[in-house]
Image (cartoon, rainbow, N blue to C red):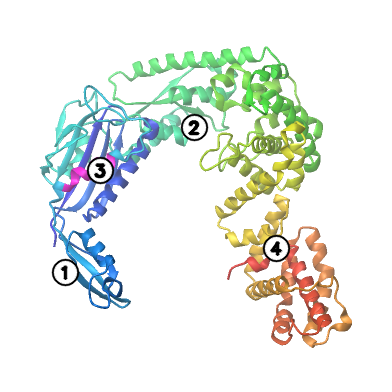
Amino acid sequence: MTDTRHLLVEIGTEELPPKALRRLSEVFAAKVEQGFNAASLQFSSTTAWATPRRLALLIRDLPISRQDRKTVRRGPALTAAFDEEGCPTPAAAGFARSCGVEVEQLDRLETKKGSWLAWNTVDKGQPAAALIPAVVDAALAALPIPKRMRWGSREEEFVRPVHWVVLLFGDEVINTSILGIRADRYTRGHRFHHPDKIYLAEPEAYLPLLETEGYVLADIDARHEAIRAQVIEQAHALNGHAVIDSNLLDEVTALVEWPVALSGHFDEDFLQVPSEALISSMQDHQKYFPVVDDDGSLMPHFITVANIVSKDPAQIRSGNERVIRARLADAAFFWNQDRKQPLGERATALRKMVFQEKLGTLYDKQERIAALAAVIAEKTGADPQQTKRAALLCKCDLVTSMVYEFPELQGTMGRYYASHDGEPDAVAVAIEEHYQPRFAGDQLPASATGQALAIADRLDSLCGIFAVGQAPTGDRDPFALRRASLGVVRICIEQQLEPDLLELLEAACEQFPTELGSGSVIGQVFDYVMDRLRGYYQERGISIDLVEAVLATRPTSLLDIDRRIQACRNFRALPEAESLAAANKRISNILKKSAQDIPQSIDVEKLQDAEEIELARQLESLQASVIPLMDAGDYTPALEQLAALRQAVDRFFDQVMVMVDDEALRGNRLALLQKLNQLFLRVADLSRLQN
């Protein structure tokens, strides 16, 4: 059994970028694992740790040396390696040269598929200690660091200056340098609580020693949960509930090594400012956790996480209260100043904000959206006048002081300012909702006015950007058209909106100048949205063949597409589904191969065999009940009724020859199959369903 040891790797640095810390730690671990696997050094497990000042790994049960590795390199087949006289061919000679030997020194490899020339080599084993530095260096070089830096007079580059390196293999230090720093067995504790070196006798001592002596909680997940628990506890002590944003919690976790949560307070007068602005100020600028009461209303408290155990916590609290007071005073100033000018009067300032060079300013975009939103409102049941009014105001808050300071409040502040100006509630709410969904999984606009405006905004961007030839390519999507497309898909499907997408795209393109030629891109934009639709369903576990079966019939309403897909999904679960899908595929092939013109109707007088007569009878009977269901979008019961055709279809193909010599009889049978095929195609092309 191979002897093994644990390996500890620690890279000690100046403060690492907090938003990148977890990613750096994960990639470092993954790359080291890949390196050891490539070097044939098997280990049992890896644990990664990370703090603002260190990246660390514990690799368990790493062999102390790599065993000899036998490799077999296969060359040309013997039949190609030697001619009829047994002399080496150029193929054999070339293979020998690539192996650095003569042809006579090559071996023979016998397999079930034949005999081959081969070259057997043995890669001698090496001590793991000799391989580890290269693995670590390669892993550090592969970290996702956009811009590396140098420090001092060193040539080495890293995300931040490196001050110490631990490379401890069992109880021995690996004699090497990493990033220009000599490796040893000394780690460092907290910058203030324990700045001195900490001696490590073995890798397993690392985590407990850092915590008990160094005042460093190196486990990022443990630190994450400790902060969460402390923040919740502080909020409960204030008879409130902490607002814990997951991104903020991750960032704070990456900012501290020894978290200590403390609560602070601010003047209640600031609560007259919209809570969203106060929360943005606390979270974005100060990394504080806001506190709300049982009703969700903001309380005049905040929670901060210090990176030190203070002898006088009141001093830390006082300092943070002094800073937040200034921040909130800024927010209050913006709020008071912005309300002095009605939101609608700010529209002229949008003339100076370019949306896209060929598409004009945000003022132009807002005007186009207003006309388009009114059209969409008529199709979705929203009030056209209120929708148009909301559209004419929807971008105006972009030129307010509050949104300039807190861009994430666009739309939200527009709602507040519109309400302050006396605009109808539907208008104010739509201004905020038209940005939804802002990201994957975000909530959708709930009001009819907000839905129409949200769709209009996104379709204007899609048609305009495609028209000027800047459609997304690869990873490049500067106008976020993928997100815009998915937003339209989600709003129409999940909010049960009926409009025809092609009609909406035509209406959107009509708002652009004729010379732009936007009408020519309607098909491209439609297909682009359909591609996003495919991804939408794949994320929900719906197989792609179901989606393609529906899209093959080219329906143009997103909600109608969804109803068809759900109906096909239910149909597939029926015992008749597989047989009918196979029959549809057979019918499709027969119709494609037919060279004659197929009659548009069935001549019942020409039906001869009992099986075709019965199929025609059942088909005629079902049409009366199925077609109205399909016209109403009730596809599930329609397909359930059509499933009753299975036996008649099976008997038809078992007993009836379609492609007979008699042209009239053949045409009549083709007409019967075409009628059956067209009935199913009113829902989907079932021939595309996989078994």
Kindly check if marks 4 and 3 are in contact, taking CB atoms under 8 A apart as contact: no
Type of amino acid at the residue the image marks with label 1:
Glu
Above or below, 169 against 238 in this view is below
Residue at image point 39% right, 36% down: 229
Q: Which residue is mark 2?
A: 243
Above or below, 71 against 530 in this view is below
The N terminus appears in which quarter of the rendering? bottom left
Total numbered circles: 4
State the CA–CA distance, disc 2 to disc 1.
76 Å
First-in-chain label (2 vs 1): 1
Type of amino acid at the residue the image marks with label 2:
Val
Q: Which residues are magenta?
A: 131-140
Q: Which residue is mark 4?
A: 684
Q: Which residue is mark 3?
A: 57
Type of amino acid at the residue the image marks with label 3:
Leu
Between circles 3 and 1, the one closer to the viewer is 1
Q: Residues within 10 Å of mark 4 (few under 14, many from 20)?
A: many
* Quarter location, residue 691: bottom right
Between circles 1 and 4, the one closer to the viewer is 1
Q: Secondary structure at mark 3?
A: strand
Give me the disc on residue 104. Answer: 1
Which residue is situated farthest in the front direction here? Answer: 85
